[in-house]
Image: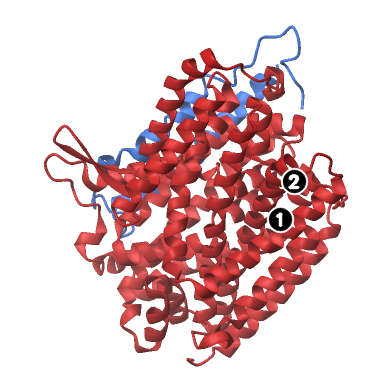
Chain colours: A blue, B red
């Protein structure tokens, strides 16, 4: 683990613009009218259920993406 | 007492013997001096990505969750699925905020949120408020883990009938207390690996086999009454169940990582990077929880509550018996033993971590802070070990002698209480602009008003707020933490004018990568 924020480098405010991608996950997760419907069903499962399950996987992928871009930018 | 399912009981007992051995053997794993509190209570902060994944996953997704979420789907339908958006949005929070808290805690040797608040704000009374909230919110949570255990033991055939019916629960708890005492956090970490493997096997087997037996998901959902299938569309001038669903998810997400046991899990990781990696990997558990929630609908499709063999179970445990009954109905006895062991062991892992977390809080932030000025490391660790026993004994007595309903209500109130530590802990990770006395008043106001609002609706989580002719049902925890924050902000200049700000022992660089 290397610190890039020792004396003389830019201060770390704990913020990175990539984090917006993480916060964007709140919108589809919490906007209930978006997914409160039966159709389209998938494998017999109402949209309400399969959408939220798929959203778990998408959000995990987005988080993994943000992990890789922010970790590599720190090592430069 | 109903018939005992011997095959399932033997498989269950064998798996329990195995994890008992594992719990004691864990003391020698990644060996450290267990007479140091951070070794006993945080596993020496040495868990890498994989072990942290099992430990935090086993810690957050508790046995009670696996029983109660499908039970809620079984009884109330779609609203139960709020657990899914809830466990989606915890991870952005974990990713952004908690590596900072991990780093400052590592640097200064903090093992509890109250340690951090004490160091950051230099106010022992604010730290005491954080401590008491943590302990009080954790105790009913431990008791609820016992409910999860009780339900599966009931499923094996031990239902009611005095102390003989309670005996398996008491034995399980003595085992838990003993290995936690001797091995500390290493025990639940090692056991979590076994437990979560079993839980994943159970969940995927159930979600593949049961729909296949029942003729597919369309048949299952066709059996669900339309009123339970979706959230009801709100009428005029109200946001109805939509806002209840979203605020429950949002408030629960902010509350989750403030619980002492969550923080214990996070701080036991070996770096902030490990915490971030886990924010991307832990959603696997959310996915599984969503699948398990569907078991509630499968239980409706089977009509488990109408089958005569499960009458005793439903009488004793109500909707919480839906999952055990469904598993008993659908699987051969040996697999029922595996699945019940997964849930039963799943109760012990979080119960162990919760009791360790409560013990750390009491020892560090009450005993050491207020009752003794000098304390050796050995004495501190010994104290925590004893307190972990007391905490578990308290939870056991509570569950044996007090109606389960009270534990459930207290745990619900616990969520409202624990979120009141957000301004000091989460905001404190970024700034100490807020005055510690203003934070203390915000905390007190949020706690009192939250409890009062919940009492006004018979200890429910959601209160229908009336704003300008609109009804806005909102999770009380979320509404009251806003009040708490507003008070803290407004009162900060006032207290800054009349009192001297104590020193902050942390530096900006302590938080940085």
Image position, residue B307 (x, y; %): 34, 85
- Specify whether B41 is left or right of B465: right
Q: Chain of mark 2?
A: B
Query: Residue beneath label 1, please?
Result: B189
Q: Nearer the viewer, residue B84 or B476?
A: B476
Question: Residue B47, which numbered label?
Answer: 2
Q: In terms of secondary structure, where does tag 2 sit?
A: loop
Q: Quadrant of residue B230?
A: bottom left
Q: Nearer the viewer, residue B60 or B498?
A: B498
Image position, residue B55 (x, y; %): 66, 52
Q: Is residue B86 above or below residue B198?
A: above
Q: Chain of mark 1?
A: B
* Contact between labelled residues 1 and 2, with CB atoms less than 8 Å apart: yes
Image quadrant holding the C terminus of chain B, namely top right
Q: In terms of secondary structure, where does tag 1 sit?
A: helix
Q: Please tell me how crowded label 1 is: few (under 14), some (14-19), or many (20+) other residues with Cα within 10 Å.
A: many
Question: Residue B167, which numbered label?
Answer: none
**Looking at the image, which residue is at 41% across and 43% down?**
B448
């Amino acid at each position: 683990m290397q610190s890039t924020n020792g004396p003389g480098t830019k201060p770390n405010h704990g913020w990175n613009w990539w984090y917006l991608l993480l916060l964007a996950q709140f919108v589809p997760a919490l906007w209930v009218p978006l997914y409160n419907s039966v159709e389209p069903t998938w494998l017999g499962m109402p949209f309400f259920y399969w959408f939220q399950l798929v959203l778990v996987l998408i959000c995990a992928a987005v988080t993994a993406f943000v992990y890789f871009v922010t970790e590599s930018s720190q090592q430069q | 007492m109903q018939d005992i399912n011997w095959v399932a009981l033997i498989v269950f007992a064998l798996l329990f013997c195995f994890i008992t051995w594992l719990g004691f053997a864990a003391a020698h794993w990644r060996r450290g001096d267990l007479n140091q509190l951070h070794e006993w209570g945080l596993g020496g902060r040495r868990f890498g990505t994989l072990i942290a994944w099992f430990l935090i996953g086993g810690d957050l997704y508790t046995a009670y969750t696996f029983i109660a979420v499908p039970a809620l789907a079984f009884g109330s339908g779609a609203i139960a699925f709020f657990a899914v958006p809830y466990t989606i949005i915890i991870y952005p929070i974990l990713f952004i905020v908690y590596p900072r808290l991990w780093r400052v805690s590592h640097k200064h040797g903090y093992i509890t949120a109250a340690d951090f608040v004490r160091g950051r704000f230099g106010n022992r009374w604010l730290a005491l408020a954080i401590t008491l909230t943590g302990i009080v919110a954790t105790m009913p949570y431990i008791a609820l883990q016992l409910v999860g255990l009780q339900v599966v033991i009931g499923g094996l055939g031990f239902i009611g009938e005095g102390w003989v019916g309670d005996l398996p629960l008491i034995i399980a708890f003595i085992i838990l207390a003993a290995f936690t005492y001797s091995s500390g956090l290493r025990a639940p970490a090692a056991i979590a690996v076994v437990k979560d493997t079993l839980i994943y096997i159970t969940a995927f087997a159930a979600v593949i086999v049961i729909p296949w037996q029942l003729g597919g998901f369309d048949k299952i959902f066709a059996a669900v009454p339309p009123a339970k299938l979706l959230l009801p569309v709100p009428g005029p001038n109200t946001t109805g169940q939509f806002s209840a669903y979203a605020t429950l998810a949002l408030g629960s997400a902010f509350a989750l990582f403030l619980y002492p046991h969550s923080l214990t899990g996070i701080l036991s990781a070996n770096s902030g990077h490990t915490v971030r990696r886990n924010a991307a990997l832990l959603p696997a558990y959310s996915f599984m929880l969503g699948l398990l929630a569907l078991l509630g609908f499968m239980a409706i499709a089977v009509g488990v509550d109408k089958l005569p063999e499960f009458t005793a179970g439903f009488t004793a445990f109500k909707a919480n018996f839906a999952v055990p009954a469904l598993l008993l109905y659908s699987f051969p006895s040996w697999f029922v033993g595996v699945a019940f062991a997964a849930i039963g062991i799943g109760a012990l892992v979080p119960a162990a971590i919760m009791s360790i977390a409560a013990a750390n809080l009491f020892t560090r932030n009450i005993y050491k802070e207020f009752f003794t000025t000098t304390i050796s490391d050995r004495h501190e660790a010994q104290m925590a070990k004893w307190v972990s026993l007391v905490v578990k004994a308290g939870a056991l007595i509570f569950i044996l002698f007090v109606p389960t309903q009270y534990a459930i209500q207290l745990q619900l109130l616990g969520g409202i209480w624990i979120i009141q530590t957000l301004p000091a802990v989460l905001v404190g990770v970024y700034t100490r602009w807020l005055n510690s006395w203003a934070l203390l008043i915000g905390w007190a106001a949020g706690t009192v008003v939250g409890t009062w609002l919940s009492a006004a609706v018979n200890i429910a989580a959601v209160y229908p707020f009336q704003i300008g002719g609109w009804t806005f049902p909102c999770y009380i925890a979320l509404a009251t933490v806003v009040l708490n924050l507003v008070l803290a902000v407004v009162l900060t200049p006032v207290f800054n004018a009349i009192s001297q700000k104590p020193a902050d022992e942390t530096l900006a660089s302590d938080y940085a990568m």
